[in-house]
Image (cartoon, coloured by chain):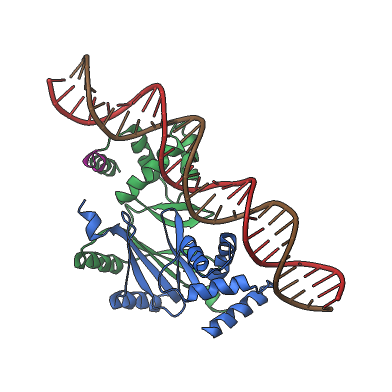
Chain colours: A blue, B green, C brown, D red
Amino acid sequence: MEHLIEKFRQFIKQKGLKYTPEREEILREILSLEDHFDVESLYLQLKKKNSKISKASIYRTLPLLVEGGYIQEVYKQGGHSHYEVTLNKQPHLHFICIQCGEVKEALDHRLNNLIEEFERQSKYRFLTYHLEIFGLCPNCREV
Amino acid sequence: MEHLIEKFRQFIKQKGLKYTPEREEILREILSLEDHFDVESLYLQLKKKNSKISKASIYRTLPLLVEGGYIQEVYKQGGHSHYEVTLNKQPHLHFICIQCGEVKEALDHRLNNLIEEFERQSKYRFLTYHLEIFGLCPNCREV
DNA sequence: TTGTATATTGAAATTAATTTTCAGAATTTA
DNA sequence: TAAATTCTGAAAATTAATTTCAATATACAA
């Protein structure tokens, strides 16, 4: 954990930006999250801990965290972006119900194998991937 | 081409909706596009052909086309959605270079087979999917 | 056909996520 | 410590997307 924070500090400094308590607090909060998040839930989560951090600061910090490889914007739903922590995670797929918004994560070795094969057959270097499947969950397909 | 239009008509009727010239015109225009598009470019393209179709109708029709599997929302850029025609196209994936931003499309039937297998093994109904692989392109991996 | 119920349209108003503005506060470096 | 610069929160602004509404078009039954 702490070495990630330190790495972020270096990343910020190296870009000629200032390392502020707000930026660190946002990163710490995100790293403590298990699940996906969006700006609203992150903001409320921080507020619950009596943080004074504004949404504007969150909106300003997220692109830095994406650039630093800490998080990724994984999908848009309900008109806004959803992010997930990408560090320390295996690549996986998401199933997203377009009706109720349910998101299900899954791992599949066949998918991993296939993507590894893609890599071997290419001149690219693969770092991570995102497979999003949109459709209807068992509940919503019945209606 | 015409059988796709006919299929769309059936799709609309089957949903209990009305088949309007506007909906058909939007579909025809989209099917004639080679590349990715967004609402603005589609609107301007239609306007150039003296179409009276409003943006509201475009916004109302695109979700139907997504649901029908004609198009996919592939990414957000500049704050708005970009779509691509998915019919007549082999299922494909995007490789995105995190260094230079290059986007490359690739085809693979094994991926499609695998996703169809996921669907059979699940209780979900899959409407569309999107695979993005992030990494370094041949140029950028050398640096 | 004609009539009726219902859905759709364009234009304008509205909504909501995100971005920007701005003045005061904090950080950095010398 | 001072000067230069960036950052912050709050509010205003922006803008993609959605909704409203009255007029019109479609579907379908009689």
Q: In what quadrant of the picture does the N terminus of chain B appear?
A: top left
The picture quadrant where one finds residue C28 is: bottom right
Q: Check if residue B15 falls in the magenta segment.
A: yes
Give the percent coordinates (x, y) of residue A71.
Answer: 49, 71
Q: In what quadrant of the picture does the C terminus of chain B appear?
A: bottom right
Q: Check if residue A106 falls in the magenta segment.
A: no
Give the percent coordinates (x, y) of residue B120.
Answer: 19, 65
Position of A43 relative to A8 (above/below): above
Give the percent coordinates (x, y) of residue B50.
Answer: 47, 31
Position of A124 relative to B33 (above/below): below
Give the overall secondary structure of the magenta segment: helix
The picture quadrant where one finds residue D19 is: top left
Q: Is A111 positioned to the left or the right of B52 in the image? A: left
Q: Is A102 positioned to the left or the right of A86 in the image? A: left
Please, which residue is most extreme toward the bottom here? A3
Give the percent coordinates (x, y) of residue A114.
Answer: 32, 75
* Magenta region: B11-16
**Residue A98 in sight in this render:** yes
**Residue B136 in sight in this render:** no
Which residue occupies 51% across, 70% down?
A49
Which residue occupies 44% across, 66% down?
A37
Q: Is B92 positioned to the left or the right of B142 in the image? A: left
Which residue occupies 31% across, 56% down?
A100
In the image, B72 versus B107, the foreground residue is B72
Position of A82 relative to B137 (above/below): above
